[in-house]
Image: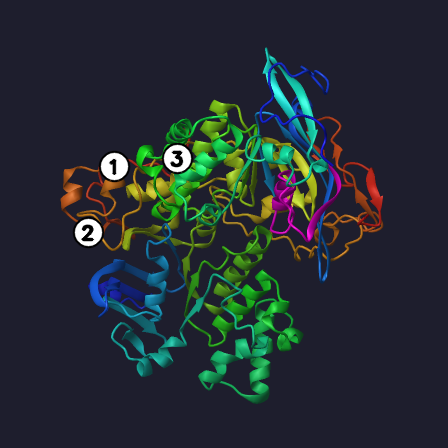
Amino acid sequence: MESHETVKPQPTPSAPPAAGTNDQTNGKDHAVLRIKDLHTYFYTVVGVAKALNGVTLDIPYGKVLGIVGESGCGKSVTALSAMQLVLPPGRIVKGEIILNRIRKQGNGFLVTDEVNITNLHPRGPIMRSIRGAEIAMIFQEPMTSLNPSYTVGNQIMEAILLHQDVSEQEARDRAIDILRRVELPNADAVVDRYPHQLSGGMRQRAMIAMALSCTPALLIADEPTTALDVTTEAEILELMRELQAQMGMTIAFITHNLGVVAQMCDEVAVMYLGRVVETAPVETIFYDPRHPYTAALLQSIPRIGSRTKKRLEPIRGVVPDPYANVPGCPFHDRCNAFMPGTCDVRVPALMPLPDSDHHEVRCFLHSDAYESENGYDG
Amino acid sequence: MTAEQSHDDNLLLDVKGLKTHFPIRKGLFRKVVGHVRAVDGVNLYLRKGDTLGLVGESGCGKTTTGRTIVRLLDPTAGTIRFNDPERGWVQLDSMGRKELAPIRRNIQMIFQDPFSSLNPRLTVKRIVAEPLVINGVASGDELNDRVAGLLKVVGLRPEYMSRYPHAFSGGQRQRLGIARALALNPRLIICDEPVSALDVSIQAQVLNLLEDLQTDFDLTYIFIAHDLSVVEHITNRMAVMYVGKLVELAPTDELYYSPMHPYSEALMAAVPIPDPRMRDRPIRLPGEVANPANPPSGCYFHPRCRYAESMCSQEEPQLRELAPDHWVSCHFAEQLTLRGVLDRGG
């Protein structure tokens, strides 16, 4: 499974351009991570839960991509798959996850190297060198993802020492430095504190510091503010935006909160039942959504400022469970634009809208293209 | 809150100076070494048909306030007066269990977590019927009919009566919790984060149901929540709490568009508005939320307040009515011009 390339935590400037030298600044050509037709299934005793059913998604370089959807839509499994952290009985059964190592050259970008993560062994040296160093992740609950028996500093230093050739003293200095960058007051003192001595907001800052300690090209944030109070949430979001701008980082921001998406993201991918159903720039998603699910989701949330107290329009029914084999488009039984004979027979393909800038929709209202007859393949 | 107001027939609940403290015990003899002042002076009133939003950060005492009002917890100080439809004004804070029992029919609660608030070993029928049985309201066929009726009211099929909670989704379970709360035809329902565990599309269904039930059954709600978009949608009045104290009590629109307390202002500036054209920087609150076991002197908010002056650390501000129905506890509320939720981009 392992390829023969040498272990490279960071793309070196002298590396030969292996995968073409596109220097167009078209976002599409500069995906840091390109996920193609990804299927991740969980083989449980009660059946096969098809958590991902053909996720196709580009995470554009230097942008914040929001991945939105309701619980069970596969947004977290997508992130875990990209990190090769899916545990048995879960398994990636099909598809590709390509990590593009990109560096800036003049006004354009240079893809120096590409790695197919799906081909790597989860515990092999290459995946280990990528995980944490090139792709880092922060989780929803900072208390459970920090180790309670080590100081914050120790945990950050561990990541630095693992991926970089520095002395322990240097690692500690870097840890303090990065704690300062996430605006923790008293970074010199916090570095020696244990997680339980910090408040929720401070813990999440420490988590971000740990994730950023090796300046990853891609940061995956899985509901990083869901457990926080609204004022702390706003501060953490602002911090992430600032750091993203300073460090030129790419962020995949997983959330169910459309308010957070609007405030935080440049691009949005909406997921439903293991598939991406629409991707577009954030303004387009909020002002010109084309997939009935996206539109329905926006109708169902209360909006501050619409002084006409109008009734919310809920989406009828519930999300089907992942064991069920829904024929056709997985949203058809809740959809207001349901077309019998079409939507319940074939699965629409994710297609770009003709006259738009990277706006893709998976719906027969916009394209007749379909990806498979009769629902679930595989 | 004045004398004539408390005799107002339109009032349903009048809470004054409510305090709920929890003792901190230490050592071999469990000596009381201090108190967590979870609720530390809350004044509020409810009119019939109100939906009062109770908001604030985690640990500010909103749930404790709710639970003390239904007397699941005993207050340390203060009065809770309730306008019972049969008995008139009664004082809940000093009542014993026996006296409370008949009044409790009129005050019910809906809980946050639809998974842990329903007994997994009981059928839906027994869960919803329990309040009716305990209070001796119905039995036999009549009980069956009542349960079936309640299930219909909350949008569940009566045929599901003999199933167990695990067979239901989160949204359906929350409907069961609502059916149980409605069983005794209460006047006041305290909803403690009723939709925070639900997905957005399901959240809308439950919010609509709560609104419909309010109209159909003349209900009054206290709606405890942290999602300020939901609170704005469903409430007509709001109470903002900070470290056990009520800092502002106002009609919802006034609180969102022209808050008068600096903490409310910071809350409003932090609301993530689902509109990418309305982005703004939040108001930074320096430091951490005060410890309710050892609160700061004067105004509890002063160490984090950007408008604080020396007076704020010495004198505790009182809750004052600065506009009709708009109560604020801030020394400088009249002088400050604060930003509302839509004043962004500044």
- N-terminal label among 2 and 1: 2
Cα distance in 3D space between marks 2 and 3: 27 Å
Mark number displayed over residue B282: 3
Front one among B180 and B182 = B180
Q: Quadrant of residue A269?
A: top right
Q: Residues within 10 Å of mark 2 (few under 14, many from 20)?
A: some
Residue at disc 2, secondary structure? loop
Q: Amino acid at mark 3?
A: Pro
Q: What is the span of residues highlighted in magenta in the rendered image?
A: A69-96
Q: Look at the numbered discs 3 and 1 and tell me whether their residues touch, using CB distance below 8 Å.
A: no
Q: Which residue is mark 1?
A: B336
Q: Quadrant of residue A69?
A: top right
Residue A333 drawn at (x, y percent): 73, 54
Q: Which residue is mark 2?
A: B318
Front one among A236 and B307 = A236
Residue B92 drawn at (x, y percent): 29, 73
Cα distance in 3D space between marks 3 and 1: 18 Å
